[in-house]
Image (spheres, rainbow, N blue to C red):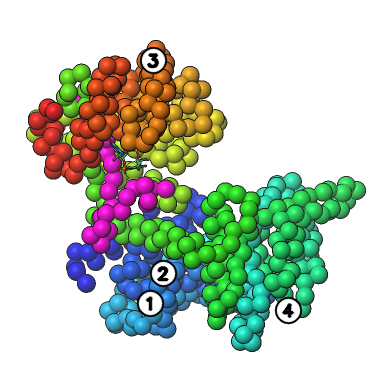
Amino acid sequence: MEETHLKEELKLFFETLQSPAHTRREVLDNVQKAIALIAEQWHVGRVAAALSAPESGFRAQISNMEGTLYQSVRPTGDDTVSINFRTGEGGTADIIFYAEEGYQWTEEERRELLIFGQTILGAFRLEMMDYLLRRTMPTDLSVSMQNIAGFMAHLGGMCARGTVANYIGFYFNTHNFKYVNKALTHQKADGVMRQYTAMLMQGLEKDECAARLGGDNFVAVIRKENAEAYIHRIGNIELVYQDGEKSRKFSFGATIGVSELENIHEPGEVMMRISSAYQAARQRDSKDVVYFSEEIHKELMRQKEIIAGFYRGIAKQEFEVYYQPKVNARERKLCGAEALIRWKRHGQMISPMEFIPILEKEGSICTLDFYVLDKVCELLSVRIRENRPVYTISVNFSKRHMENPHLAQEIVEVIDKYNVPHEYIEVELTESEDVKDYIVLANLIDELKAARVCASVDDFGTGYSSLNMLKMINTDILKIDKSFIPFGRDESDNQKDCIMFESILKLAKALGFRIVAEGVETEQQYTYMYEVGCDIIQGYYFDRPLPKDEFLQRLDSGQY
Ligand code: C2E
Ligand code: CA
Ligand code: CA
């Protein structure tokens, strides 16, 4: 292995493990990200955490639990390295690395894995270990229902007998249980859960099985002929809970993943199919039922690969910032640029349209946006030091940052680290569907402005209630979405497009916004923009997003 890469990844691994974590969820997140960083290089197929408590301990009934911390897209082999540590009351905790199929670790790699494992164990306090296991290892004692172990054993029997193809597999998550937990005490909520699980099992045939994975996640295998009825049942469960004097009525729906089980030989394949179908159902934000298909599976694998490859990609400098010039329409002079991220993975370019939505859902987009900001500030600081022409460069900040109350401050810290005057950075923000978020957005923009950092609203017009937003926010710049630019390639009604565009432009200008038109590709579009008085233009007509070196040359000339 190359020395420098090794060092980089190790550094990142340790940094990630030590990055701030205030909640258990964050500790677990850090651990999982850190493992993903080293997994590929060290041929790790799976990493598990296990806890065994003594008979008398707080987990009297659960002896050996194992939860998954990392699972590669490749199959897992037999070689293992495990790190063991004694817990306070005489139990043990382990981190276990499983190699990729067919891979045998060298002695040196084993030593390195031991260090990783020890560091990971150190990152968990014992209490967290317990939490981790509850998150990753589905168990159930509070209701008399099978747990995952029971379910797997049941599937194992079906596979051995070769009857599994006669069944349909289910993986589902109950809606509204959160509400029950809020409305009732813990103990009472458990009572509701017991009633609920009883209803899931009611009338099952002996050869059918329903099990609780933990929380409000369930799995089941049901005979083909009963499957439709079961889908209907779990989608519409109503129960009455006797809360002392009061009787409370609850109704539950579910997000359901379903799969046929033809050509299956192992319980693991059943789990893979039903959990893929379930994840697809969840991502579609619908209460509908989703059936497993090869496409769904491929798509999920792709997503996992992107998420797992992200931190490594950062460490290995696979991400590159491109810059697309913005041009002053009247003077045909460069007046700024937008930073756009590119990911070159194994020599291939992956489109941001593909990986950004995935990272956005998962949350790593926040790291990526700050990475871009860092690179942009670095470029600006060099230009300023060399006394060369500089312009404001905009950086995209995902909606996901809206959850961060210190965002403005953190942005300013990065800019200050490079001693760049604040006005050279513009933050491009997008509106979200939720009107409540406008207040967050409006506050953020005010904070940025107070710090003299520019802010703009991106993709204007595509959001839910864009016009309402105009009243509430205090930004200077609106970027009108590409889809509103008239004379596009599609066969649209140009006259109507022009009316729309000019109305938006007029309204926005009257309210005092500066307008950037994005996606201007042709001479005709440029001339139109010039004539209707649009100030700033960004689009292929002038430039595509340029790699850094080409952009630097543009900055020096500045003319079109
Ligand atoms: P966006 O912010 O609306 O960025 C403009 C997109 O329009 C860019 O696509 C750009 O290459 C493309 N574009 C520019 N001029 C033209 C044109 O004349 N015609 C056409 N058809 N397209 C043009 P790109 O680079 O593929 O990025 C896609 C989206 O990915 C961006 O849309 C943005 O939402 C997101 N993105 C890119 N980089 C980042 C980033 O660093 N952070 C975040 N959060 N999002 C990013
Ligand atoms: Ca943008
Ligand atoms: Ca845009």
- Identify the residue position indicated by label 1 in the image: 100
Res 413 → quadrant: top left
Q: Which callout, 4 or 1, points to the residue nearer the camera?
A: 4
Residue 473: numbered disc: none
Give the quadrant of the C terminus.
top left
Asked if one can make out residue 145 in the rendered structure from this viewpoint, the answer is: no
**What stretch of residues is rendered in magenta?**
335-357
Q: Secondary structure at mark 2?
A: loop
Q: Secondary structure at mark 1?
A: strand
Q: Which callout, 4 or 2, points to the residue nearer the camera?
A: 4
Crowding near pointer 1: few (<14 within 10 Å), some, many (20+)? many
Of pointers 1 and 2, the one earlier in the residue sequence = 2
Query: For residue 354: magenta?
Result: yes
Distance CA(mark 4)–CA(mark 2): 33 Å
Residue 50 on image: x %, y % = 52, 73
Q: Main secondary structure of the magenta part?
A: strand
Distance CA(mark 4)–CA(mark 3): 69 Å
Residue 447 as seen in the image, left or right of residue 548: right
Query: For residue 424: magenta?
Result: no
Q: Is residue 77 above or below residue 315?
A: below
Distance CA(mark 1)–CA(mark 2): 8 Å
Tell me which amino acid carries mark 2. Ser
- Identify the residue position indicated by label 2 in the image: 72
- Identify the residue position indicated by label 3 in the image: 506
Tell me whether circle 1 and circle 2 mark residues in contact (CB < 8 Å): yes
Of pointers 4 and 2, the one earlier in the residue sequence = 2
Tell me which amino acid carries mark 1. Glu
Residue at 53% from the left image edge and 57% from the top image edge: 280
- Identify the residue position indicated by label 4 in the image: 207
Distance CA(mark 4)–CA(mark 1): 35 Å
Q: Secondary structure at mark 4?
A: loop
Q: Secondary structure at mark 3?
A: helix
